[in-house]
Image (cartoon, coloured by chain):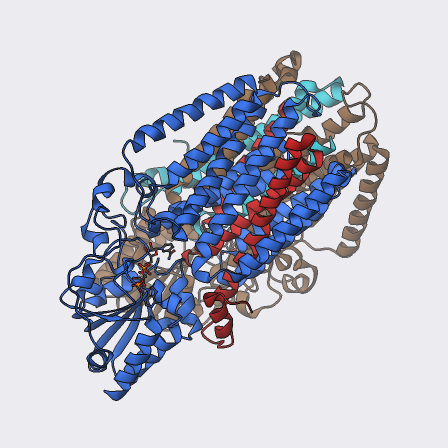
Chain colours: A blue, B brown, C cyan, D red
Amino acid sequence: MTLFTWIDLVYLLAAIGFILALKGLSSPKHARRGNLVGAGAALLAIGMTFAVPSVRHAGSHLILMVVAMVIGTAVAVPAARRVKMTAMPQMVAIFNGVGGGAAALVSMTAFLVFTSTSGEVAGKPAVYEIIEVVLGVLIGSVSLSGSAIAFAKLQELMPGRPVTYPGQQVINAIVGLAILGLVVTVAVTANVAVLVILAVLALVLGVIFVLPIGGADVPVLISLLNSFTGLAVAASGFTLHNNLLIIAGTLVGASGTLLTRMMSKAMGRSLINILFSAFGSVITATGGADGTGDTRPVKTGTAEDLGVLMAYASKVVIIPGYGLAVAQAQHVVKELADLLMARGVDVFYAIHPVAGRMPGHMNVLLAEANVPYDELKEMDDANPEMSTADVALVVGANDTVNPAAQNTPGSPIFGMPIIHADLAQNIVFLKRSMRPGFAGIDNELLFDPKTTLLFGDAKDSLTKLVAAVKAA
Amino acid sequence: MTLFTWIDLVYLLAAIGFILALKGLSSPKHARRGNLVGAGAALLAIGMTFAVPSVRHAGSHLILMVVAMVIGTAVAVPAARRVKMTAMPQMVAIFNGVGGGAAALVSMTAFLVFTSTSGEVAGKPAVYEIIEVVLGVLIGSVSLSGSAIAFAKLQELMPGRPVTYPGQQVINAIVGLAILGLVVTVAVTANVAVLVILAVLALVLGVIFVLPIGGADVPVLISLLNSFTGLAVAASGFTLHNNLLIIAGTLVGASGTLLTRMMSKAMGRSLINILFSAFGSVITATGGADGTGDTRPVKTGTAEDLGVLMAYASKVVIIPGYGLAVAQAQHVVKELADLLMARGVDVFYAIHPVAGRMPGHMNVLLAEANVPYDELKEMDDANPEMSTADVALVVGANDTVNPAAQNTPGSPIFGMPIIHADLAQNIVFLKRSMRPGFAGIDNELLFDPKTTLLFGDAKDSLTKLVAAVKAA
Amino acid sequence: MTVGIIELLTIFVLAIFVGNEVVSKVPSILHTPLMSGSNAIHGIVLVGTMVILGEAQGTAQVVLGFLAVLLATLNVVGGFVVTDRMLEMFKAKPADKAKAPVEGRDEDGSKP
Amino acid sequence: MTVGIIELLTIFVLAIFVGNEVVSKVPSILHTPLMSGSNAIHGIVLVGTMVILGEAQGTAQVVLGFLAVLLATLNVVGGFVVTDRMLEMFKAKPADKAKAPVEGRDEDGSKP
Ligand SMILES: NC(=O)c1ccc[n+]([C@@H]2O[C@H](COP(=O)([O-])OP(=O)(O)OC[C@H]3O[C@@H](n4cnc5c(N)ncnc54)[C@H](OP(=O)(O)O)[C@@H]3O)[C@@H](O)[C@H]2O)c1
Ligand SMILES: NC(=O)c1ccc[n+]([C@@H]2O[C@H](COP(=O)([O-])OP(=O)(O)OC[C@H]3O[C@@H](n4cnc5c(N)ncnc54)[C@H](OP(=O)(O)O)[C@@H]3O)[C@@H](O)[C@H]2O)c1
């Protein structure tokens, strides 16, 4: 067998490795091992690529290549290891964006080779070959700039709420048509300059596509962009006739699309609604809801009073949210819960599917604090019990208990199922300020007469409550 | 795009159709539609094949082709439409066998073309090409002859029980080694004559492979041969560079293998045990159990007595089997059950997973007689209730209640979970004779002092019982 | 050529995964239809036999090719028809009495 | 050539089925790791970028190629590392207190 056959066989092995990696994710037990299999497969394929003649004999380019890889690794590893768990989505966004960029560059450069008479495929390439290139460049670029904006929103470098401006649709339409025209032109003329313009416009498209999407929906968006990058990679795979790229890219493209649908379902919204709801009611709705909070008075309480309240309650429901993760208060909250149970209070945790910043975020935190699984209730099991609860203790949660999701059609989180803290006799919020949650919208519940706020870091507040309950 | 591209695209469509056909089977609701999609895909692909130049311009061969297809259809359709539901497994066996034969012939003929200097691929073909051919011929032939024997066993053209003879292993070993040697020879010499001998030996292998497998296990075997044919087809697909054949064949190969494992699990046996158990204990065990029945006396009863017995029982469990299907007694049995329930008797049906001749056979029959699903109990739910049952009414079941499966290690059905009719206070068998069931082995339970037999066709016997219960 | 074989191999591997994933979702009550359904699918070897017969040279090849087409036709046609009949049976819901006669025909084997 | 494209197209289609089937089995608690895991997988585009840079002629292509390799490396390396960290977190069982400090490090972001 020729060297090429060997390389291709290794690539096939790698592809299998990737499939197994995804299969591993079907259960938390094998998930991590699966991921390692995937990493091994990638390593194998990359190593084998050094055996490709054009790479092996690339001389000075080979050095550049290694340099680029070293730099990349030197940057990526510490970044990936240091990033806070709460900042994971941003991180994923970046890595996804650069991937899209790489794919776009591959297609672009391949096109240069095609068209430069010096390239081995001299003369004008077949139309379908051009289409492959165009798709790679187009999708890849959109994914790149889109991910960048998504990152900015998550990192709060820019307001998370939907960005809207007059004439938005018009601009979108123009850009869209322009791109369409350029695609055709390139397909016909195979002109490099036009392709470059196309790439630039694609970058613009990515930006204006993501801008109007609300912060709370960005994670879904990232999943979508993820599948875009996958498709871009697959396209470049077609261009390079590389099965591995095609399979890997397509796997991601398909799974990403499915995952996007599954996530938007978890948020109780349709994908279309998530992507385009900003054009319309939202504009008005988000008018006053820019998170600056309004000036209405809220009821605040002391740890002592609240401690007593809970100590003598018969049923307390703890609703954890992102703030619990930020404050790392999972151990203290368990202490409080155990204390109350010891006093005969009926206590359980109500877990919202999208509480925190990643699916399963709360489960992981509380499991780590050794909270028994049977004390955790999924939203649907918890809600029927809320009306009989004396106290709903909201620890660093906000959007997931925001009634606006149910009763304010214009709201960016409208349609998302919530945990009905509002049904409890008393609602206690532990948060540091009046600042809104992830979605960047105010929460009427904070002004509810039944609500008492205890300002401060969740960990401190909980410690105080523990003391208060002990004293009571 | 060239004509070939079009043909290939249509083939790809067909492949997708096949995948969808299999996906449809994940729920009874879409199963039938899925099958039609598959049939449509096949039709599409076949039609398109007439556009292939070498086929289109085949002249007289083209006529032969059409003739063959007409004959085939004329034979297959009525056969498939007339076959009794109870004879389905045989039918599947035949169709599977001929498929394997076809695949073998394709590879064989392709090889002739390869090697005949007149063939477009002149000269000695590459080794891996020969291997593809050999695999196609080998697996296809085994599947052909193996299916033939399986058919004979199911159709009772030969004894269903394992066929064993002295020196069996030795013969197997010789045949196996001979085939191995021939494979190597062909790979090296690319000699047609050797390939033909190989094919013949492969046919022999198929026979001696299936002979020692017990009748009750044949369905599992068919599923295995089914996957063999699939692989043979895939192999010929490699030889002809036909993606459709590769995909379709592989799909069947993979699914067949999985299905085989799932079925043997349902029978409570390992695949190895099913395929090779005959070599050993069974030989002795099956000695006296050739279904001629022994001469010990059995207790027979009258419909009247049994009717009274059931009428005044507090709990009656009906255990249907293959005989219910043969006698088409599903409506009468429901009548009896309803009658007893009307008298306040606690009645339910205990369904064994492999009762009848196909999985789900009993469910379908009884559903057709409008027996409410909640009166059907799966084996595992039923068994705990058997000991409290006054009467176990065994309607045309045998192997599925045969204690030998539990207590006679040598028995061909040993290891299969059974419905414990033996635990009931009284056991009533409705069957026509002392003849054994599918597995061709006697049933100790017939001689149990607690057992009463009511000989005769299940439908008649049940009608008598209904009358008796009414009279009681 | 060698590149070709790799592509085919890749297709082969992917098809294995698809087959396994899809079939693992089939409930045991549908195992028999699954068996005969997949049986029908590999009948598509007919396509291959047609090409073979088309290109056949000399009696030997023609005879083999003819036989192959015949057998493959039996497989694909019979396979799909049988499967359809089985699934028709599985459609039976407690509600529809109408199917009883059909069922009867199926069992006693008389023609419609 | 045209034959080649068909094979690639076939691989593409099969990969779609595999991707869908496999992912449909992933529980929602693992959706985030799935996102970052698949994200890492498409980082394999690095293989393509290497070839491109290898064959690059003229500054333009070299620069683009270099950039591509750099970005792709970020994607594949970072992707797998991040995913591993997430899954490490998901291993946490009610039993093992030992992981608490690790978790702490993860959250507050200080180095081990
Ligand atoms: N789970 C997912 O998959 C996922 C992914 C992406 C986005 N999301 C979105 O994230 C949101 C999750 O809702 P959520 O209710 O869990 O959180 P949230 O709506 O983001 O609200 C978090 C709350 O915690 C408070 N907080 C922050 N740090 C705190 C600290 N150290 N101590 C005490 N309080 C603190 C914040 O108020 P202060 O700042 O005033 O303290 C804020 O009100 C939803 O909008 C969801 O759509 C979820
Ligand atoms: N379900 C599946 O997927 C499947 C597939 C293939 C094989 N099998 C095998 O088939 C067997 C099924 O067990 P089973 O207990 O259901 O059936 P069985 O063991 O085959 O016994 C059927 C019994 O019904 C009696 N019978 C036949 N026609 C009758 C009629 N018209 N009226 C009254 N009785 C009649 C027969 O005795 P007489 O002849 O004396 O009347 C025989 O004893 C198992 O061995 C299983 O492994 C199952």
Residue D65 coordinates in the image, percent (x, y): 64, 37
Image position of D12 (left or right of B106): left
Placement of B219 over or under C105, stated as above or below: below
User: From the viewer's perspective, is residue B32 above or below residue B116?
Assistant: below
Which quadrant of the figure has residue B194? Answer: top right
Residue A154 is situated, as x and y percent measured from the top left of the image, at: 40, 52
Query: Residue at left 34%, top 43%?
Result: A213
| Residue B352 seen by the camera | no
Q: Is residue A44 left or right of residue A220?
A: right
Q: How many marks?
A: 0
For the C terminus of chain A, the image quarter is bottom left
Q: Which of the 4 image quadrants contains residue B241?
A: top right
Considering every residue shown, the one lying at the far bottom of the view is A471
Q: Is residue A56 left or right of residue A18?
A: right
Q: Is residue A130 or residue B449 the one in the foreground?
A: A130
The residue nearer to you, when weighing B381 against C38, is: C38
Residue A19 position in % (x across, y down): 57, 49
The residue at 32%/42% (across/down) is A163
Quadrant of the drawing holding the N terminus of chain A: top right
State the image coordinates of residue A256 (x, y, percent, origin top left): 46, 45
Residue A57 in sight from this viewpoint: yes
Decide which of A22, D85 is in the foreground and name it: D85
Q: In this rendering, is residue A74 above or below D7?
A: below
The answer to whether residue B378 is left or right of residue B100 is left
